[in-house]
Amino acid sequence: MPALLSLQKIEKSFGSNQILHQVDFHLQKGQVHALLGANGAGKSTLMKIIAGEYTKDAGTIRIEGEDVHILSPGHAKRQGISVIHQELSLVPEFTVAENVYLGKEPAQGPGSFLLSRSEAARKTIELLDKYQIELDPHRKVKDLSIGQQQVVEILKAISEDSRVLVMDEPTATLTAAETNQLFEVIHSLKSKGIGIIYISHRLDEIQQICDWVTILKDGRKTAEGPIAEFGNERIIECMVGRQMDHYYPNTKHNPGEVVLELQHIRKNGVLRNVSATFRKGEIVGIFGLLGAGQSELMRIIFGADRADGGQLICKGQAVQIDSPRTAMSHGIALVTENRKEEGLVLELGSDQNMTLTSMEQFSGYGLRNLGKIKEIAKEYVGKLNIKLHALHHPVKHLSGGNQQKVILGKWLLTSPDIILLSEPTRGIDIGARSEIYHLLDRLAHEEKAIVIASSDVDEILGLCDRVLIMFRGEIIAEVDQADASIELLMEYASGARQTTGVGG
Amino acid sequence: MNMINSTNPVASKPAVNRLSLIQQYGMFFILILVAAIFTMLTPNFLTPSNLINILRQVSVIGIVAAGQTLVIITSGIDLSVGSIVGLSGAVSAGVTLATGNAFLGIAAGLLTGMVFGVANGLLISRLKLTPFIVTLASMTMLSGFTLIYTGGNPILVTNPVYKFIGQGYVGPIPFPVVVLLLVYAILYFVLKRTVHGQYIYAIGGNEKASLLAGVRVNLHKTIVYGTSGLLAGLASVILTARLSSATPVAGTGYELDAIAAVILGGTSLFGGKGSVVGTLIGVLLLGILTSGMNLINVSPFYQNVAKGLIVLLAVIIDRMINKEKQ
């Protein structure tokens, strides 16, 4: 039986820069096929060729044995190929049914100008039944969770009889529960013979949901095979081309004096009686499922949100932090969760972004010292190994990893003692992740207090000296690195295990 | 079964409706409140003749605001409608005078409005220009055209057929009020029941998603701006007929009153939601304020202050209602 989608010897260049070299890729019916590679390996180019956004220079594409030329996104859709983008393209004010049938509304009357809402709802219900998905077709999309919205995107695609679904980091913004629900939907799609190309940086998920894996490096296929034959080490090796003994730094830290103490912090509906201490030269992880309150806690410490009660003690003094400015004056920095919305001014260059929070150092009498800004930006680009074309190039063109390094550079320029990070490696490829881990390790050795709020259990285990586990707005456990394990952390974080009296 | 949705699908529906009712009727409640206050302050307010008078007075702005509602739902804005009122009226009066045919004159007025509306729409959709800038430019340009066309002088209209549009009655109801209600009924239907109406909301709610779903965004946007221009032309004909003359400065500032009415009606400036029913309530609120303050002899200077305050207050209240929802 021919493959559902078969790409052979695909080549693609931009100018003199060859991105893809003779890449083969075969997707079978009912298969979930992971496509892996570091940023720049060519996987997004390959995806764009499949989706019709780019055209290949050479090679053949076959769908169920038939040669096809994919000319445009619309053309790809008609061939049965749909892409679920990371940024969802839904109309928030519309219902599920209205979104699923947007652009192809069932209509009646002369020239089909009259809407038939009941018909759209009926067809949506049919679709929901066929794939055994429980979702109210009359609910507005803005009232749905992100996970449910993603399901609507999938419904949109399969309502057009798509046979190939490309999912680009579908779980990046999902809670663990939502991820499991998405996986159930994926299983249902599989059983109906739909092929899924699954792109993700999260190795644990790939092991869980995918059947097959293809790995790219520098535009070439380096490995392919059933997922069972690939352990995490082998996947990383194929992606970066060398063994990664030091993916995590694994060095010993010597925690010093307490620099920050939280006493009974609470915020209605979000945080309940959170107490904790953080020391110099220590990396502390705050682990919890998305929505457990760890991001909110970071924002409150930084003064981006207000607490409803409790006390912060910074370097032995009780302090009132009512704004990010005050937090900065106490030597606190926060690397926010959303790089693009809260971390960067996307249209500005790396130099401008990095000096934004420490402008006082680079200006006098209200005038900016451009020479000094450039000089220091250059220094940090080197220090942090940021890959960019030019300092003044808008940061929106940088990869996620490099963007995150620019943000780190920005905060390091304020010479902070306490660095808070929320989901610091979300959507960042493995190579850049490892670099960021090593950087945080170095900072801990420089006596900074590092606090990482993350829902990625792997990085919490690999990086942190001590883990605080949050569940429903409370710190319910504290575990040392030596005692921590995935099972233990997940048990606490999901509320399956309870302790009392942690942290006072 | 995948338990994607934990709540009962049937039970969630009325809750949403009830909420939109509160929002819809929130402004209606303020309208009633303001009317009640004026009723207490002066016996001349709550009389059939005054109420009909209010309706007639708001008909011109009301029709302009109806078109503006569509534009704002697409997350656009049309600043040129005031100038279109000026120019369409002048052209309409001029053609009526030259041909002696009221119908030709009316058609010319409507056509002028539509042509410039479509021009706005084409510039905005095809060239991807910002609606604010495009319509700001055409607002300035069109008011210039009006002055050139009229030479700065009013054009008198004596044609009785033409004057009926602004001064006639259907039974006890002034003709402009009939037109007003008709316009709102048609637009209500278009937004609620037609595919075009659905796309107006879709474009305002998420233009990119609409484009990706195969919606002809450019076409529908152009139709929306064309409609706004056409309705400004219609309002202009009514205004000219009521005053029996087209003045070069007619329509000045109408765009702002229209936008205020739309916002009062609960349509979001960010697009994607809103209704013409809301706009009608907004228009009536502004009309009642003007009429009531005239009746109790508030100086026009203070009237502007009061109107501005009411708009602000209404929007604050609306925001509070919406916040509670979250």
Image (spheres, coloured by chain):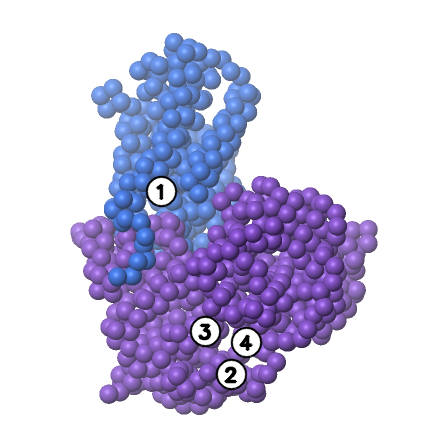
Chain colours: A purple, B blue
Which label sits on residue A233? 2
Spot the residue most to the front. Answer: A500
Left or right side of B8 for A380: right
- Residue type (three-letter) at the residue carrying disc 4: Ile
Q: Which percent across, then down, holds residue B58? A: 38, 27
Which chain is home to disc 2? Answer: A
Q: Are marks 1 and 2 in contact (CB under 8 Å)?
A: no
Q: Residues within 10 Å of mark 3 (few under 14, many from 20)?
A: few
For mark 2, give the secondary structure.
helix
Q: Are marks 1 and 4 on the same chain?
A: no
Instruction: Name the amino acid, label 3.
Output: Asp
Which amino acid is tagged 2?
A: Glu
Location of residue A450 by image quarter: bottom right
* Residue A358 vertical position relative to residue A212 in the rendered view, above or below: above
Question: What label does residue B157 carry, if any?
Answer: none
Numbered badge on residue B230: 1
Residue A275 percent location from the top left of the image: 61, 51
Which-is-in-front pick, marks 1 and 2?
2
B158 with respect to A16 (left or right): left
**Is B170 rendered above or below residue A141?**
above
Residue B61 position, x and y percent, is: 40, 32
Residue behind mark 3: A204
| Residue B225 against residue A348 in the figure, above or below | above
Residue found 55% across the figure and 25% down from its top: B305
Q: Residue at x 24, y 58 (%)?
A: A124
Q: Earlier in the sequence, mark 3 or mark 2?
A: 3
